[in-house]
């Protein structure tokens, strides 16, 4: 009998992030099927609902650690949850892999924490370089969700990176406050201030959670704002949601991403085909990030002789040049993902790669 390894999963399956979490889960399930058909071990997921709020995600982590005694956990989902879970991770010493958190510096705070998606510190420098080349912006505005760990980290890196370009000025820096799990509010005042900035911004850098990305693009279009948005990690699912609610509102938006559906990487093409035949639809980047996390964990499990947390942690730390759907994938010394970011612009509701 193959050894069965229980792996904890924390995803916000209910609440505001529910639809995205389902995509992540689909990607994870596909990877699970493939690994279990191929390897000498079997993975069994023990799934806990993080309910789109921080306290529920932390409670889920504790249950997986104390009741289920899992050696590894995929999650938490958001940067805010992951940051708040660090004392727990350090206390429980469970190999922990977030498939979607992207705040820079999280991995430095725990030797048991790994991030399989790119952090903003890796997407922003390349994203600014390429978006500037294509848009030629001189005056820009920034808009950030001030109470979210990912958004603040993204905005800090964007501000810092723009500061290295002497010909670019931030003419207006706007912010709003939307705690994770709450529904998007009114940001007319912030958008109007950006619209009225002198000189008029050539581009707007938005750092927000998924519902904030969607809500902002819709609201801006309804206000008649026709300045291109540059949005760190906006997904194809969000683009479709925006264009369905407000046709054309997402056109011209630039994303900094870890993966795109039209990637030419062989592993990615195979993933897209297999996902399509299993679920009857194209995977978005949340599905891809779920799939990638499980394949990376599977690679670590493949390398260990005993399935305890410390062995799994050590095996994750040693992953270098793994052929993932993102392309060649490694963890750095902090457990942060190292792979090439993709910069793309929305045309006809699809991402076209910029280089």
Image: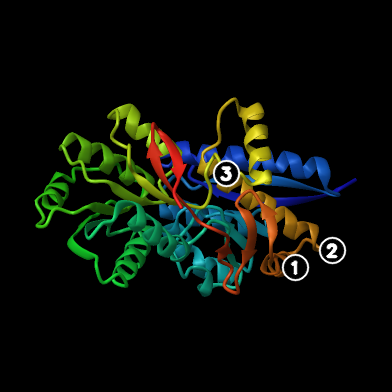
Mark 2 nearby-residue class (10 Å; few <14, some 14–19, many ≥20): few
Q: Mark 3 points at which residue?
A: 263
Mark 1 nearby-residue class (10 Å; few <14, some 14–19, many ≥20): some
Q: Distance between the residues labelled 2 and 3?
A: 34 Å
Residue 203 horizontal side relative to residue 299, left or right = left
Say whether marks 1 and 2 touch (CB < 8 Å): yes
Q: Name the residue under label 1.
A: 311
Q: Which circle marks residue 305 in the picture?
A: 2
Residue 49 in sight here: yes
Residue 141 horizontal side relative to residue 230, left or right = left
Which of the pair 61/28 is nearer the observer? 28
Considering every residue shown, the one lying at the far right of the view is 1
Badge 3 marks a residue whose secondary structure is loop
Q: Distance between the residues labelled 1 and 3?
A: 33 Å
Which of the pair 181/200 is nearer the observer? 200
Q: Where is residue 354 in the image (x, y as percent from the top left)?
A: 44, 49
Identity of the residue drawn at 52% across and 37% down = 22
Identity of the residue drawn at 32% across and 41% down = 252
Nearer the camera: disc 2 or disc 3 = 3
Sequence-earlier tag: 1 or 2: 2
Say whether marks 1 and 3 touch (CB < 8 Å): no
């Amino acid at each position: 009998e193959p050894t069965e390894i229980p792996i904890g999963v924390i995803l916000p399956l209910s609440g505001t992030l529910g639809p995205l979490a389902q995509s992540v889960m689909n990607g994870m399930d596909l990877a699970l099927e493939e690994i279990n058909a191929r390897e000498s071990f079997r993975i069994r997921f023990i799934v806990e609902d993080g309910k789109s709020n921080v306290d529920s995600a932390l409670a889920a982590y504790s249950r997986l650690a104390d009741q289920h005694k899992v050696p590894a956990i995929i999650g938490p989902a958001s940067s805010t949850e992951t940051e708040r879970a660090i004392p727990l991770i350090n206390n429980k010493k469970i190999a922990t892999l977030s498939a979607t958190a992207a705040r820079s510096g999280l991995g430095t705070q725990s030797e048991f924490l790994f991030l399989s998606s790119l952090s903003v510190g890796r997407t922003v420098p390349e994203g600014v370089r390429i978006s500037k080349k294509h848009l030629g912006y001189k005056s820009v505005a920034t808009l950030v969700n001030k109470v979210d760990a990912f958004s603040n980290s993204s905005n800090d890196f964007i501000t810092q990176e723009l500061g290295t370009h002497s010909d670019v000025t931030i003419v207006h820096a706007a912010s709003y406050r939307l705690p994770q799990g709450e529904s998007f509010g009114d940001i007319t005042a912030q958008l109007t201030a950006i619209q009225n900035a002198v000189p008029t911004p050539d581009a707007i850098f938005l750092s927000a959670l998924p519902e904030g990305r969607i809500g902002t693009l819709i609201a801006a279009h309804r206000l008649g704002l026709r300045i291109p948005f540059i949005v760190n990690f906006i997904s194809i699912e969000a683009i479709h949601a925006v264009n369905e609610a407000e046709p054309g509102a997402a056109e011209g938006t630039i994303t900094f991403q870890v993966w795109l559906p039209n990637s030419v990487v062989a592993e990615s093409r195979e993933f897209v085909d297999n996902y399509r035949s299993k679920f009857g639809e194209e995977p978005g980047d949340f599905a891809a990030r779920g799939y990638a996390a499980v394949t990376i964990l599977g690679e670590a499990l493949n390398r260990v002789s005993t399935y305890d947390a410390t062995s799994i942690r050590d095996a994750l730390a040693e992953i270098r040049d793994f052929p993932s759907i993102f392309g060649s994938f490694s963890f750095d010394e902090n457990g942060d993902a190292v792979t090439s970011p993709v910069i793309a612009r929305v045309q006809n509701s699809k991402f076209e790669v910029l280089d």
